[in-house]
Amino acid sequence: MYRDPVPSLEAPGLLPAATPALRVGMIGIGTVGGGTFRVLARNQRLIAARAGRGIEIVAVAARDLARAAGIVGPAVPVTADPFEVATHPEVDVVVEVAGGTGPARDWMLAAIAHGKHVVTANKALLAVHGEEIFAAARARGVAVAYEGAVAVSIPIVKALREGLVANRVEWLAGIINGTSNFILSKMRDEGLGFAEALGEAQALGYAEADPAFDVQGIDAAHKLTLLAANAFGMPLRFAEVQVEGIDGLEAADVRGAEQFGFRIKLLGVARRTPQGVELRVQPALLPAAHLLAQVNGSMNGVMVKGDAAGVTMYYGAGAGAEQTASAVIADLVDVARQAGVPPAQQVPHLGVHPHATEALPVLPRAAARGVRWLRVPLVAGQGLHALQAALAGHGVLLQRAVWADGTPAAAPEALCLTEPLVQAVLDDALRALAAHPAVRGPVKALPVETLAA
Ligand code: HSE
């Protein structure tokens, strides 16, 4: 195995002899845990030099003991009981990479109660139980670090907390589910149907154990919840995220967006408005030339607009064993460096984030404002003017209305772009349109995002 040839550890003063290694207990040694073990071993000296102390795995919990022993070797004790690791007297920090939300919550709370720092890549756990976990960690004075929970290879939590710390964030928008992005890219580039593209994503291992979390937007909503808490200093409000996945999209939507020069992406958007924060995950249209529209396949991308930095963009793999390990180990190094530093002076504030500095309300879906793209199946022989007039009668004005390319004369479809409007107005108009004799079937409505600098 390649070992990093950094020779400088022995240099006088680089690693103070008195600094003991950070002792890590791992719960889960599957794909991500195995990747973490591998990267820690491969880059051991480099990581220790950067952390100022060694980082050693001293205990592992795994379901398959034989497989785990095969990965970590005979020197590291392996147990089937995660609580043994969570409460182990010789463990300083517990890395939870087993996944799930029920038992994982209990392991983390047990670790915190025993004074352990915790590092996790478990976005579902933190989005749902994070307030409780962070409160327990604050009370106990330990860290909860989770860079690996969002867009794994991209250090976006660190960017928000550290690099952009001077900014008042105005909005952030991200392609933060690789499976959905892979499916949308396949549908656009290869004309695949939704189910076929999902099958490929599963075969390649991008999808969650339950792919509904990916294609229904839930996984992206977990990640958006964590990003918004860091961007706006607001509590974790997963239950209030508006969530719509890509599972309702058809090839005609992808084509129809292209006809207007847009790409459809599953976007997580958090935007500060005078009335509160918009928090939504939904398929949205982006101008084809937009930087986020260039994020294809299973890759992730996040764009942040800060009042001082302006627009910044982050791109990288959103899944993968060593990609997640990269984030998990970065958190371990942060923990290793912060021993003895009071929480208020820690960089990042591992002991106290996310902390509610702003009590921003989350805007209801009906209050969202913007341009909408519509795909409207019409009865043969009906004109675009009739549609335009029907929508105008309900307060929906159109910038453009054209026939969709390639739809048969017997079953025509119109594509429209509205003027900016409030979602509640559109919802009312679409309810009325459903009963209109010129309309042949359900209308598809998606937001258009310009995400301008
Ligand atoms: N299923 C997730 C995705 C994996 O597709 O992005 C990483 O969170």
Image: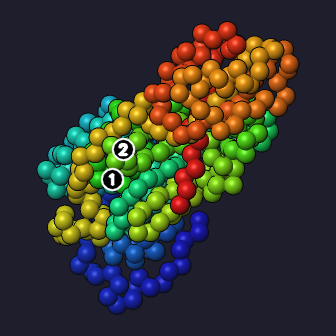
Residue at left offset 76%, top offset 39%: 259
Residue type at mark 2? Val
Q: Nearer the viewer, mark 1 or mark 2?
A: 2
Marks 1,2: beta carbons within 8 A: yes
Find residue 275 and name its label. none
Q: Residues within 10 Å of mark 2 (few under 14, many from 20)?
A: many
Q: Mark 1 is on which residue type?
A: Phe
The first of marks 1 and 2 along the sequence is: 1
Q: Which of the 4 image quadrants contains residue 239?
A: top left
Q: CA distance from mark 1 to mark 2?
A: 9 Å
Residue 318 position, x and y percent, is 55, 50
Q: x%, y% of residue 386?
A: 70, 20
Name which residue lies at 26% across and 62% down: 349
Left/right placement of residue 327 relative to residue 107 reads right
Mark 2 secondary-structure assignment: strand
343 and 97: which one is in front? Answer: 343
Q: Is residue 51 left or right of residue 235?
A: right
* Picture mark count: 2
Q: Whole-percent x and y of residue 272?
A: 38, 49
Q: Would you say 94 lies left or right of 50 here?
A: left
- 260 sits left or right of 290 in the view: right
- Tag 1: Cα neighbours inside 10 Å, few (<14), some, or many (≥20)? many
Compare residues 285 and 129 and report the one nearer the observer: 285
Question: Mark 2 = which residue?
Answer: 277
Queried on whether the Cβ of the residue with tag 2 lies below 8 angstroms from ligand 1, the answer reads: no
Q: Which residue is mark 1?
A: 232
Q: Closer to the camera, 342 or 260?
A: 260
- Residue 186 visible in this rendered orientation of the protein: no
Residue drawn at 69 percent across, 37 percent down: 400
- Seen in the picture, residue 393 relative to 59 is either above or below; the reply is above
- The secondary element bearing badge 1 is classed as helix
Residue 424 shows up from this direction: yes
